[in-house]
Amino acid sequence: MAAPWYWARAKRALVRRDPVLGGIIRQHPRKALEPRGEPFFTLARSIVGQQISVRAAACIWERLIALAPQMSPSQILDAGRKKLVGCGLSGRKAEYVADLARHFADGRLRIEQWSEMDDEAVIAELVRVRGVGRWTAEMFLIFNMLRPDVLPFGDLGLQRAICLHYFKGRSVSVRTLRRISDAWTPWRSVATWYLWRSLDPVPVEY
C-alpha cells in the first residue's frame, strides 16, 4: 500500500530541520504510515487500543475480527455486548464500540463532510461519541484521514520518546516538549509516527 502523498516531502523537511528526528527517520528507511480506508474500522480499533499495550490490543482485535469479519457496524450490533466482552474487551469498551456502531448505523456522523472540515471541527464531532476522546479522534485524523499536521500531545508514547531522544530520558515541562515540536509543523503527524517507531519498531495500525 502506498504511503500518503506528503510522506517523502515531509521526511526531507524533518531531516533538514531536526537532526535528532532525522537520525530516527534514517533508521527506518522503508517504513511509512499505512492508510486505512474505513472510518468505522479505524475508530473501533482506536477504542480497542485505549490504555492497553499494542500487543494486548492486537490480540483483542484478532478476536473481534473473528467475531465480525467485515468489522461493520451491523455485525458489531448483531454480536451483542456479551460476545464483545468475550473477545477481551472490558464491559465499558464493549459499550463504547457498540455506541460507535449505532452512530454509524443511524447516520449521526457526517462522514461525507469530514474531508472539507478542519482538524478541530472533525475532533469536535467525533468526541460526541461515547468512548471517543481527543486521543482517539487524533488517531483517526492521522491513520484514516491522513491529516499531515496532527500532534497527539496527550499520547504517553510520544511524550516518552521526546524525553528519551531530546533530554536523555529526563522529564521536562509541557512547554519544553511543545517547543521541540514547533519545528515539525506542518508535518507533525509524520514526526509523531517516527517517534513511535523509535520505541516500537512494529508500526501500530488504527
Image: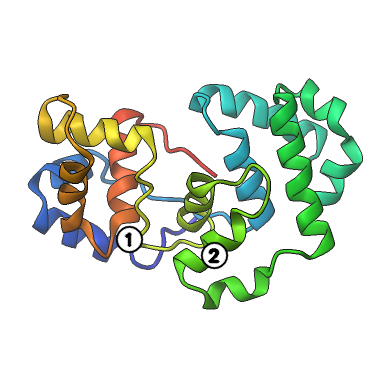
Q: Please state the total of marks drawn on the protein image.
A: 2
The image quadrant where one finds the C terminus is: top right
**Residue identifier under label 1:** 7
Q: Quadrant of residue 27?
A: top left
State the residue in front, 35 or 45. Answer: 45
Indicate left or right for 48 with 28 as reference. right
Q: Quadrant of residue 49?
A: top right
Q: Callout 1: few (<14), some (14-19), or many (20+) C-alpha neighbours within 10 Å?
A: some
What's the residue type where badge 1 is placed? Trp
Q: Is residue 72 visible?
A: no
Residue that appears at 54% across and 65% down? 122
State the residue in front, 131 or 10. Answer: 131
Colouring convention used in this rendered image of the protein: rainbow
Q: Nearer the viewer, mark 2 or mark 1?
A: 2
- Residue 128 at what x, y percent from top left? 64, 55
Residue most toward the bottom?
A: 116
- Residue 108 at what x, y percent from top left? 76, 64
What whole-number distance in Å separates the C-alpha atoms at marks 2 and 1? 22 Å
Residue that appears at 62% across and 34% down? 48
Residue that appears at 49% across and 24% down? 53
**Residue identifier under label 2:** 122
SS class of the residue under badge 2?
A: helix
